[in-house]
Image: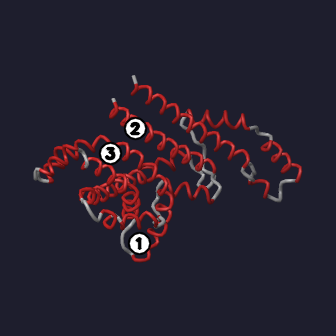
Amino acid sequence: MRFPAEIAARMTRTLLLMAVAAAGTILLVRFAPGFFSDPREMDAKYAAAARAEMWADSSQRSIASIAVQTVSGWRRGDFGESRQFGVPVSELVRARIRVSALLLAEGLGAGWLFALCAAVPVSAMRRGQALCGLPFTILLAIPTAAMATACILSEQGGPVLVFSLVIAAREFKFLRALLESAWSAPHVLWGRAQGMPVLTLMRFHIVPNAAPRLFPLVTLSIVTALGVLVPIEVMFTVPGIGQLAWAALMNRDLPVLVATSLLMASAVGVAGVFSTGARALEDA
């Protein structure tokens, strides 16, 4: 019964997270300066009284009416129309979500491969672990924007490389700690004392013991990836969700900003659900 209860609790927290994100974006829409302004107000042919009437009509919209209208549109899959591009928000998101998903998949895959290839031999060392892990510590201290700037100036690498370095730097220490605990198991120590080959220990003892604990780390690294998605896409001009959110922020295109914020919150919540499910299955 523990596994369903934990999944239900995490699902509830995910829905609450999305509700908070929705409420925050609705408040942002209501109180954003000039959001309800009408372009006709800038036209000199409209009298001052007409402009005042348009302003009064828009300013009287309550938070409740905005919430009802917004949520009703979301239930129909309608996120409104972009004020910057003049097209439905769903079309903008649909055209860019595949680009961001592919970048996330490539960056996460390369980053985890890099971190695993480094953590496996370092965790098996009895001395010099701190020195071998120093490059990852240095990478962890370098901002994402600085890595992207170095790639652009040197004309070497690209968004996938920066993504993989960020993920590898953050996951290396967790992988090393996890593998160190596996190497310290009594049966593994006994096998090493008996001269059992390292590859045999890895195949039959280290990997089977560590694999169930890797999945929660993979799902939680999605949160890290989403955090660096915006600067990477903006600096490398990748036409994805992160660049769209940045453009919406710069141009006060709040319908697009609302949709991208909810999409990010949903991705974080789903990653948390899978992470909790894996831990529950492991403990069951």
Which one is nearer the viewer's eye here, 195 or 104? 195
Mark 1 vs 3, N-terminal side: 1
Relative depth, front residue between 57 and 71: 71
The nearer-to-camera label among 2 and 3 is 3
In the image as oriented, which residue stretches furthest toward the right? Answer: 49
Q: Which residue is mark 3?
A: 214
Q: CA distance from mark 2 to mark 3?
A: 12 Å
Dot 3: within a 10 Å radius of its alpha carbon, few (fewer than 14), some, or many (20 or more) residues? some
Residue 122 image offset from top left, x and y in percent: 27, 60
Residue in view at x 56 percent, y 47 percent: 261
Q: Is residue 156 left or right of residue 251?
A: left
| Residue that appears at 53% across and 34% down | 13
Distance, label 1 to label 3, CA atoms, is 30 Å
The x, y position of residue 200, in whole percent, is: 13, 49
Of circles 1 and 2, which is in front?
Answer: 2
Residue at image coords 47%, 58%: 239
Say if mark 1 contacts mark 3, CB within 8 Å.
no
Q: Which residue is mark 2?
A: 274
